[in-house]
Image (spheres, rainbow, N blue to C red):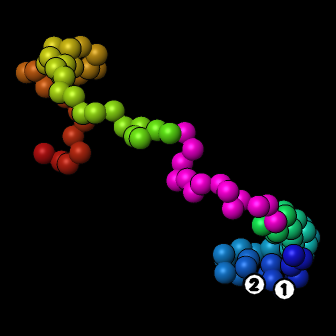
Amino acid sequence: MSLTSNDVAHVARLARLSLSAEELERMRSQLSNILAYIEMLQEVDVSGVELTAQVTGLATVMRPDAVTDGLSREEALANAPDQRDGMFRVKAVFEE
């Protein structure tokens, strides 16, 4: 399928893109090549291929939640640049 410059200009307008004449022609050529490749793929016989949502066989990639011990106060404050009374001290955001 070959696109016209008007087709590409229309899509560019919808995407709020401002293309020069040179960019418009380059995009027309590239998009036409992509659509031609897709047309080739449409010719492939996939009638015997089972539908798949994903091909790796993974059921889930999330690990189960596990309760673990957190850091102690001393461990959390060990690298704090400034602390007082067991808390982080930070620069004031609001005037006091």
Residue closest to the eye, 60 or 7: 60
Q: CA gap, disc 2 to disc 1?
A: 6 Å
Placement of 78 over or under 32, stated as above or below = above
On the question of residue 88 being in view, the answer is no
- Say which residue appears at 89% left-offset and 77% top-offset: 2
What's the residue type where badge 1 is placed?
A: Asn
**What is the span of residues highlighted in magenta in the rendered image?**
43-56
> Would residue 14 appear left or right of 93 to someone viewing this image?
right
Image quadrant containing the N terminus: bottom right
Q: Which residue is mark 2?
A: 10
- Locate residue 63, reporting x and y percent: 33, 33
Q: On the image, numbered disc 1 is attached to which residue?
A: 6
Element at label 1: helix
**Residue at image coords 19%, 22%:** 68
Viewer-proximal residue among 20 and 40:
40
Q: Is residue 74 left or right of residue 45?
A: left
The amino acid sitting under disc 2 is His
- Say which of 41 and 23 sits in front: 41
Residue drawn at x 69%, y 62% is: 47
Residue 14 image offset from top left, x and y in percent = 66, 81
Q: Specify whether 5 is left or right of 85.
A: right
Viewer can see residue 75: yes
Residue 28 position within the rendered picture, expressed as x and y whole percent measured from the top left:
87, 72
